[in-house]
Image (tube, rainbow, N blue to C red):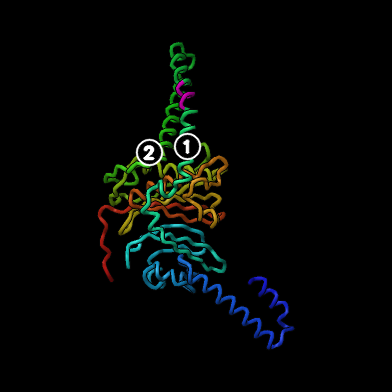
Amino acid sequence: MKDFFKGVRKHIGKLDAEHLREQYSLVTDELAFSEMIFHTTSDGYLVLNEAGVPKWANHAAERLLGMKPEDILPTLDIPLSKSSKREIEISYPDRRFLEIQTYPMGGGETLVKLADITANREKSEEELRAGATQAVRDLASGVAHEIGNPLNAISLNLQILEQNPSDKESIAICKSEIKRLDGILKGFLQALKPSRPNLMPGSPAAPLKDCLETLKAQLEDRRITVSVDMPGALPSVALDPAQMEQVYFNLIKNALEAMKDGGSIGITIGSDDNDVFVAFHDDGAGMNAEQIAHLFEPYRTSKEHGTGLGLMISQRIVRDHGGRIDVESAPGEGTTFTIRLPRIERRVRALK
């Protein structure tokens, strides 16, 4: 289509009225065919202008949203002119979950894709990731066997050295590292065998403090500064502190690895009528639309030695808390991950 228009523009001065009508007819037929394809797909597609107003939408968009796009879009706070991925819950005309992805189109316009993921949300983790997760479990079992025995041998030798130590501090460090590696291994295996969170009322800020303390040395070594902006008091949410700390750890490690030569991570905590949110923004390299589209999938990672499991596990944990993870990013502009957890007592918004 693009080459066609270039050809017509190049030779338009040589075309008479009859040839122009023929070319116009070809264009309208091509556009009608393209529009028919978009209107028959089960996914919803919209094009928004720079103000977020729909310029075009297919039939599925209105069906998935449950009303005209222009009536509901202002409440969804869709990012404009940047790549993003998030999930929302729709209650009308029936309850379902939608995945929303945005793609910058240039000229201030944004392409929005809507997909119904209700069935996927209702399936178990094993059903969702059966093939990939089983392969990872097999790998994890092998890793556990190969690493477990050397750890035991090292631990035994350190106990012998303790009887006639030459450097108590070094021995203490080695023992501490072995304990840490053992914890990582157990956590890895446990993550691949999903366990329901032990939910209790609390604040999402508490696990964050412990997580930052754990990562303090790594952040300082990489010259990463961290700022935390939060109110004095937050509404309570139902959470498992240990599991939520694991989510924070994964997100901060991702941000840390996205910044090779120093940088900053800004953490913002707040709430609205429905949720308490924790947003992590880094000023790293950012991601393009293709990378965002495949986030939360195993083996989809830009890291040289990564597995892509960290984000998949984090999403599962947040979903088990009744929440969601949103992501916004653009190449050269960093990335923002936002965790949203439902308030225990949701405020009723007054109708205007």
Residue 42 among those drawn in magenta? no
Q: Relative to the observer, which residue lies in front, 218 or 315?
A: 315
Q: Relative to the observer, which residue lies in front, 13 or 213?
A: 13
Image quadrant in which the N terminus is located: bottom right
Residue 150 among those drawn in magenta? yes
Estimate how packed mark 2 is, as few (under 14), some (14 to 19) or many (20 or more) residues with alpha carbons within 10 Å.
some
Look at 72% across and 84% down and name the residue there. Answer: 15
- Residue 262 location, quadrant: top right
Image quadrant in which the C terminus is located: bottom left
By secondary structure, the bulk of the magenta-drawn segment is best described as: helix
Looking at the image, the residue that sits furthest to the top is 164
Q: Is residue 30 left or right of residue 8?
A: left
- Residue type indicated by callout 2: Asp
Q: Is residue 21 left or right of residue 219?
A: right
Q: Which residues are magenta?
A: 148-152
Vertical order, 235 against 307 (above or below): below
- Residue type indicated by callout 1: Asp
- In the image, residue 9 lies at what x, y percent? 69, 77
Numbered badge on residue 138:
1
Look at 49% across and 36% down and name the residue there. Answer: 139
- In the image, residue 282 lies at what x, y percent? 49, 49
